[in-house]
Structures are given as C-alpha cells and as structure tokens.
C-alpha cells in the first residue's frame, strides 16, 4: 500500500463515531447516486424491469399458498396469501440485503481503494438499494389487500409497519458493517452466511406465525418454553410481528418486537465497532 494510503488509513482509524456519522451525512448525495446507479444497472437490460423484484415473492407465495391451503388446508390466518406476503417481501429484503451488504467491501475493492468516501457508504448502498426494491413491492401487497379486503381487518397497530422497516434497516446495516470486513479476511464466510439464511428461513415465522410458536387465542399449539426463548433471540421474529400486527392482530407480540428492537440496535453498535476496528486491516488486505 502506498504511503499516502497508509496515512489515510491511520487517519480514518482515529476517527470517532461522531466524525464518521458526519462524514457519511456529508456524502449522502453520493450515496444516493450510488444507490440509483445500482438500481439502473440491475434493470438496464431487463424487459420486465422492477417486476422482477416482486415476481420471486409472488411465485413463492403462490407455491406456499397452494401447499398449505389447498393440500394441507392450513387453518387460520386468512387470507393466507396476504399473511405470506407480509413476511416474504421483508424476508427477501433481509436475505438480499445481508448477502450484498456482507460482501460490499470485497466486491467494490477497486472503487474503495481509489475513492475517499467513507467506507461505511458501501454497506449502506447495498442495504438501501435492496430496501428500495422492497418498497417497489409494497404496491403489489396493497393490491392483494384490496382484493381480499372482505377477509382482512386493518387495526390501529398498522403504525408498526414502518417501525418494522426501521428495525430491519438498522439490523441489516449492523450486520453489513459487522460481516463485510470479516468477509474480506475470512474467505469461507460467504457459504456460511448462505447456509445460515436458509436455516433461519424455517426458524423464522415466515410461512407460519408467532401465534403458532407462543400460542394464544386460536393458537394451534404451544412450543416448549426453551424454543420460545430462542425465537425471542431471533430479531426477525419481532420484525415480522411488527409487519403483520396491523393486519393480523393475533400476531402482535410486544415481547418479540421489544427484543427485536434491542437486538437490532445492539447489532448496529457492534457492527459499527467491528467495522472501525478492522478497517485498517481490511484496506491492507485489499
């Protein structure tokens, strides 16, 4: 690494949290340009454009809907297609945001070495771009809600939907900051993340609900208390509860939402610390 880059790396290593936040805020226009560039590149040669961002969850929802309502005749949580979409759409943001955010430094190493932008920008770019794709899918969710309006009751807890978005953005940013420098240093981390997200899909209330875990009125069964405790440690349980609470009130579990909020903030703080701690080492590795 040239001496100028070494001096820059040492200077960045000494930056405090407030300085880092200030640098990111001052680079917000560049961040937005990078996000728009990502979206344009993604859909530049596509005939269907942004439809691809909702086609995957729609196909998955149709498959799960057929299996659990037609074949197994799953009781409760009607309309089940809306119940699924309220979790599958955020889940795809989670998996894509985690995948892209965790490899953001490694995949953009050339640009990172040649620009003076705050390194955190590259993680935020990935999480925001995938978050905007999630926002593109919300109109489709609304269409299904209108179509099944006779079976759907919107309640006061609908305000928790944007809270779920904030918690998920905080969690994904923290995970990206935590894992992106580690992925540069540990080459085997990417397949571990891929396997972990597959396992977490079934360990999260996506195709089922927290009502099936914690029970309550209409709950089919209660999981053992040890299993319930594990679900509380999974922040996606509380985040998905926040998304669904305004439309399926039995899915509102304040303990899960509270745990998700705390874990998301702690993950962000830990990720911020690890990113700052390993930034200099990562730059050397690049």
Image (cartoon, grey):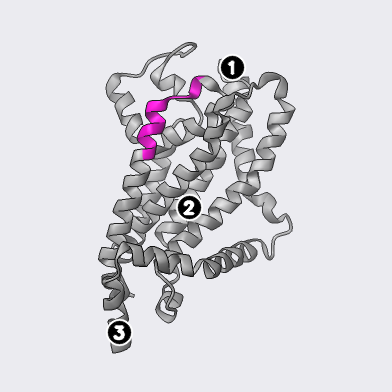
Magenta part of the chain: 250-261
Q: Which residue is mark 2?
A: 97
| Residue 190 rendering spot, x and y as whole percentages | 37, 56
Spot the residue most to the bottom.
3
Q: Which residue is mark 1?
A: 73
| Residue 206 rendering spot, x and y as whole percentages | 49, 32
Q: CA distance from mark 1 to mark 3?
A: 62 Å
- Name the disc covering residue 1, or none: 3
Picture layout, residue 175 above or below residue 78: below
Q: Residues within 10 Å of mark 2 (few under 14, many from 20)?
A: many
Position of 54 with respect to 2 (left or right) is right
Q: Residues within 10 Å of mark 3 (few under 14, many from 20)?
A: few
Secondary structure mostly taken by the magenta-highlighted segment of the chain? helix
Q: CB under 8 Å between callouts 1 and 2? A: no
Q: Earlier in the sequence, mark 1 or mark 2?
A: 1
| Residue 64 rendering spot, x and y as whole percentages | 58, 30
Residue 203 visible at all: no
Between 260 and 80, the one lying in front of the other is 260
Picture layout, residue 48 above or below residue 224: below
Give me the residue at 68% from left, 65% from top: 44
Between 66 and 240, the one lying in front of the other is 240
């Amino acid at each position: 690494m040239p001496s100028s880059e070494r001096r820059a790396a040492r200077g960045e290593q000494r930056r405090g949290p407030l300085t880092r936040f200030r640098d990111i805020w001052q680079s917000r226009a560049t961040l937005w340009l990078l996000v728009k560039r990502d979206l344009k590149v993604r859909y530049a040669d596509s005939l269907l454009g942004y439809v691809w961002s909702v086609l995957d969850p729609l196909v998955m929802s149709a498959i799960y809907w057929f299996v659990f309502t037609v074949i197994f005749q799953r009781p409760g949580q009607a309309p089940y297609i809306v119940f699924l979409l309220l979790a599958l759409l955020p889940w795809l943001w989670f998996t894509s945001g985690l995948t892209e955010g965790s490899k953001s430094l490694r995949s953009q190493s050339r640009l990172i070495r040649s620009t003076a932008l705050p390194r955190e920008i590259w993680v935020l770019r990935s999480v925001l771009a995938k978050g905007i794709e999630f926002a593109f899918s919300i109109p489709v969710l609304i269409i299904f809600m209108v179509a099944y309006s006779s079976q759907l009751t919107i309640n006061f807890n609908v305000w928790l939907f944007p809270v779920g978005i904030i918690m998920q953005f905080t969690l994904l940013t923290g995970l990206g900051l935590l894992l992106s420098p580690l992925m540069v240093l540990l080459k085997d981390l990417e397949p571990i993340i891929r396997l972990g997200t597959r396992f977490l899909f079934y360990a999260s209330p996506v195709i089922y609900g927290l009502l099936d875990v914690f029970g309550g009125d209409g709950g089919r069964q209660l999981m053992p208390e040890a299993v319930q405790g594990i679900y509380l440690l999974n922040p996606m349980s509380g985040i998905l509860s926040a998304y669904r609470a305004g439309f399926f009130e039995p899915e509102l579990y304040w303990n899960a939402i509270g745990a998700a909020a705390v874990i998301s903030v702690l993950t962000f703080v830990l990720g911020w610390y690890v990113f700052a701690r390993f930034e200099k080492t990562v730059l050397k590795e690049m």
